[in-house]
Amino acid sequence: MLASSSLLSQPDTGKVSTSVESGPGSVEDSCRQSQGNVPLERKWQSFWKRVLDRIGVDDAVGFAVVSKIWQLLTGPITQFLLVVRFTPALQDYYYAFNNLLGL
């Protein structure tokens, strides 16, 4: 049995009610205290979270978009390094295996 909450069964109705302790240091007390002064950074985070939720962007969509942006930024750098650092024979191997992976 948990120390902070206990289940009390009422014999005549068969329903179960939950009794939770409240007081200094309880979860309810900490929630009440944290609602007061919210830092500006957290307000902006919640603002952007609400905007993204409204247009239907959840975590999976967000990660996919960030991944595509990362590919857009690193693709030209990778191509530049391939041309500058790889020998022509090594470039042939790279592009051949890359095309096989694309199939």
Image (tube, rainbow, N blue to C red):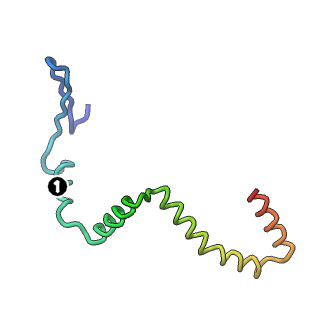
Instruction: Give how far across and how far down residue 85 sits, in percent.
Output: 76, 79
In the visual, does 33 lie left or right of 89?
left
Q: Mark 1 points at which residue?
A: 32
Horizontal side of 78 relative to 9 (left or right) equals: right
- Residue at 16% over, 20% down: 13
Q: Residue at x 87, y 73 (%)?
A: 89
The furthest residue to the right: 89
Please tell me whether residue 101 is drawn above or below residue 23 in the rendered image.
below
The kind of secondary structure element at disc 1 is: helix
**Quarter of the image where one finds residue 11:** top left
**Residue lying farthest to the top in this orientation:** 12
**What residue lies at 14% left-to-right and 17% top-to-bottom?**
12
Give the side of residue 102 with respect to residue 11, left or right: right
Instruction: Say which quarter of the image contains residue 71.
Output: bottom right
Q: Which of 38 and 25 is in front in this view?
A: 38
In the rendered image, the vertical position of residue 44 relative to residue 102, given as above or below: below
User: For the view shown, which residue lies furthest in the front direction?
Assistant: 55
Amino acid tagged 1: Arg
